[in-house]
Amino acid sequence: MKVVVTGAAGKIGRWVVRRIMDAGHEVIASDRKLREESASDYFIQADLRDYGQAMQLFKNSDAVIHLANIPTDVRNTPQAIFENNMIVNFNVFEACKDWKIKKIVWASSETVMGFPFSVNELSYLPIDEEHPVHVKSSYAMAKLLTEQLAGMFHGLTGQQIIGLRFANIYEPDEYAHISTHWTDAEKDKQKMNVWAYCDVRDAAQACLLAVEKENLGSDIFHITALDTILPDRSEDLIKRFFPTIALKRPLKDFDTCMANDKARQILGYNPEYTWRNAVNADGKPKAMPKDLLALSNL
Ligand SMILES: NC(=O)c1ccc[n+]([C@@H]2O[C@H](COP(=O)([O-])OP(=O)(O)OC[C@H]3O[C@@H](n4cnc5c(N)ncnc54)[C@H](O)[C@@H]3O)[C@@H](O)[C@H]2O)c1
């Protein structure tokens, strides 16, 4: 397939470009930021707030993996995030409609679930795609509205439009600092996303699976690691931080509290990476292959 990856100069996009190419697809990498070292030879600089640029970019492609958004609440004003992300997401879906592109994968976010989660808003654990949403920021609202927009465009066109609600993404070199989360204050703070995370390589796996699968319609999947970001057993964390919460199914060992069961069952998602293999019990990082760190630092 000829696949356009937007946001290709970003944290997740760099790994997605590599993964899609390794699977044998032709990749057009795009971002508004120039990045000469992209894994793909085909890099097009485009600002997707401009519909004309989106139209030019997607011409003759079979699929789009859309990752270009401002990815956090903290470095831009709420208005700038909402304006950029909503218009970009609309333009991408609209241009894909006009070119009759059959498959779109796009990045939603765990934040639609209510980041930061407050105890009384949690209905049960592990949180799955059926859990009520509690949006608290312009970033999360733009993601939630885009989930609805995806439903509308699927209804109009029948295109396959898959939203991946990524948990907090880690690149391999970030595990070196993971033990900073292990203080009591941090454990309490990190409960705001029920200690969920996802390795960037597993996020890239999910993008590949979602773009290769057929007949998925319009759907949403949680994309998380198999485990939590903390060394504590999940049962102990829940007893301590959410003592009255109902469990939808039992959690063992270090099981993630943000369920990825749906992605595993429907997409065949099989997360391969955990911080537990990257650091020692004292939190010190294990030696990592140089090529892996090089890609992290691209
Ligand atoms: N990083 C995370 O923890 C995380 C978690 C959940 C969801 N997400 C989502 O995943 C996607 C990728 O996130 P990331 O962490 O790689 O972010 P990133 O900032 O590293 O990459 C996003 C890229 O999008 C580009 N971009 C933004 N606005 C654009 C525009 N108008 N036109 C063209 N390009 C534009 C930026 O230049 C940037 O390179 C985003 O949609 C983000 O909301 C990220």
Image (cartoon, helix red, strand yellow):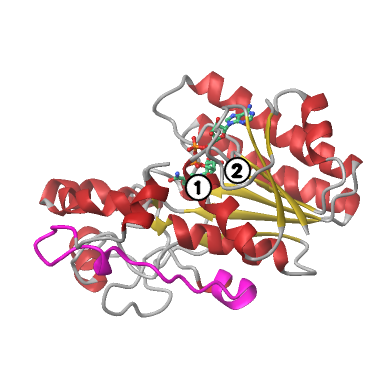
Q: Residue at x 44, y 30 (%)?
A: 73
Q: Considering only vertical position in the picture, is 22 above or below 2?
A: below
User: Magenta span: helix, strand or loop, mainly?
Assistant: loop
Image check: 39 left or right of 48? left
Residue 112 is left or right of residue 196, and the answer is right
Disc 2 CB within 8 Å of nearest ligand 1 atom: yes
The residue carrying mark 2 is 67
Asked whether disc 2 touches disc 1, contact meaning CB atoms under 8 Å apart, the reply is yes
Q: Position of residue 48 (x, y in %)?
A: 70, 29
Q: At 19% across and 65% down in the image, what residue appears?
A: 231
Residue 213 falls in image quadrant: bottom right
Of 132 and 269, the residue lying toward us: 269
Placement of 55 over or under 195, stated as above or below: above
Q: Does dot 2 land on a helix, a strand or a loop?
A: loop
Ligand 1 has an atom within 8 Å of the beta carbon of the residue at disc 1? yes
The span shown in magenta is: 263-285
Relative depth, front residue between 286 and 174: 286
Residue 71 percent across, percent down from the top left: 49, 36
| Residue 13 in the figure: left or right of residue 176 | right
Residue 12 tag number? 1
Q: Amino acid at mark 2?
A: Leu
